[in-house]
Image (tube, rainbow, N blue to C red):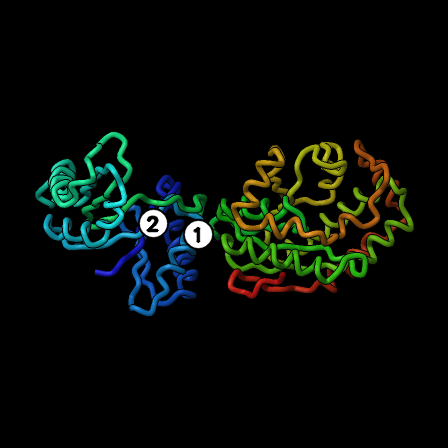
Amino acid sequence: MKEIFLMKLGEIVLKGANRRQFENKLRQNVRRRMKHYGNFDVYIMQSTLYVVPEDDQADVDGAWEACHCIFGVVSLCRCRPCEKDIDAIYNAVEEYLGEELDCARTFKVESKRSDKRFPMNSMEISREIGGRLAEAHPTVEVDVHKPEYTVYVEVRDLAAYVHGPAEPGAGGLPTGVGGRAMCLLSGGIDSPVAAYMIAKRGVEIECVHFFSYPYTSQLAKDKVLELARLVTKYSGRMTVNVVSFTEIQEAIRDNCPEEYFTLIMRRFMMEIAQRLAKNDGCGALITGENLGQVASQTMEAMTVTGAVVDIPIFMPLVGMDKEEIVTISRKIGAFETSILPYEDCCTVFTPRHPKTKPTIGQLLHAEAKLDREALMEKAVQTVERIGVKFDDEPRI
């Protein structure tokens, strides 16, 4: 029989009455992702999602790599199905795992029998298969405590399955069960990680990027679109809303005290992002803010910048160390792109001595000369919407 994937569900199994909804969404997500790799049957039984190639043209290796990036799966393994017969199980182990077993010095067999109609219990299965393997592979010793290699046998309702050690899945909840949110995506390290972390909780991600041409270049825009593409490896396809921000920044420069430049700019970003979010059916904003990291991310600064919106602001990085953020950035493949030296709008007109403990009253006074509504309405009306998916050609 052909090789298939077994994907073990994570916290979905704890969802009680809503569990079926979560399982259906996960199955839909896997089916959608597998379409790129050929014809696969996808179904869920006994808290396990099965991915079965339906013909020889399926790209099994490509599909296997993609499955590691699907939220809602805690672990996964490639396995060989076989008949529920002890001889068939042993033959499947030899054919499928024999070479890997020969590379180890010690091994054990771990069995699980969920089909209680099978005449042998789990311990008897392990003892029988382990004994036969020990005879067939005399250079590999049995060690049931700390083996170098473990052979797994699962006897389920439809068939028996043999496999080696499982690999970690992406964890989290299936994309789409947690609503939608709009991420303020810059070209830095933090915001792609923030988008990834909220996506991991089952939230569909849309993005907004503020583009300040000619102060920032087309390369800077392409860099952000590439970061979005890398996030879609986990989140699924998204739309990036590119906002022309130059006129707003120039108005701030010409009419506001320098020490408030960044804070006023952030207030515009948050309010524009909220308008786009509501237009797209998003119920929250996502930022990569990290408490105390820069002058605009003190508690007081985040209070005044968040005061202009009335939907939740998710800040998944707020209490993390920079090294923790970098570790996740590397894990999702975004770090090398994030550190490319292209300026974004946050580096334009940076104040020499930014205000770190502002009040709402100070900000209202500082931006009093601006026609906020006219500036924001023009920015929203001229947004460029760009669809992004992981299968796209890299931008950089």
Q: Secondary structure at mark 1?
A: loop
Q: Nearer the viewer, residue 17 or 90?
A: 90
Q: Residue furthest front?
A: 139
Q: Is residue 200 above or below residue 38?
A: above
Q: Position of residue 186 (x, y in %)?
A: 68, 51
Q: Nearer the viewer, residue 167 or 75?
A: 167
Q: Residue furthest top?
A: 145
In this rendering, does residue 335 appear at all?
yes
Q: Position of residue 42 (x, y in %)?
A: 33, 59
Residue kind at label 1, given as amino acid type: Ile
Q: Residue at x 75, y 60 (%)?
A: 217
Q: Is residue 318 above or below residue 233?
A: above
Q: Quadrant of the N terminus?
A: bottom left
Q: Residue at x 77, y 49 (%)?
A: 268
Give the residue number, with chain letter if any, for mark 1: 70
Q: Secondary structure at mark 2?
A: strand
Q: Give yes or no for contact between labels 1 and 2 (Cβ–Cβ under 8 Å).
A: yes
Q: Mark 1 and mark 2: span between their CA atoms? A: 10 Å
Q: Residue at x 53, y 56 (%)?
A: 232
Q: Which mark is residue 211?
A: none
Q: Residues within 10 Å of mark 1 (few under 14, many from 20)?
A: many
147 sits to left or right of 338? left
Q: Quadrant of the C terminus?
A: bottom right
Q: Residues within 10 Å of mark 2 (few under 14, many from 20)?
A: many
Q: Is residue 243 above or below residue 350?
A: below
Give the residue number, with chain letter if any, for mark 2: 7
| Dot placed on the residue nearer the N-terminal end, 1 or 2 | 2
Q: Position of residue 214 (x, y in %)?
A: 81, 61
Residue kind at label 2, given as amino acid type: Met
Q: Nearer the viewer, residue 338 or 7?
A: 338
Q: Looking at the rendering, which quadrant does residue 140 occupy? A: top left
313 sits to left or right of 304? left
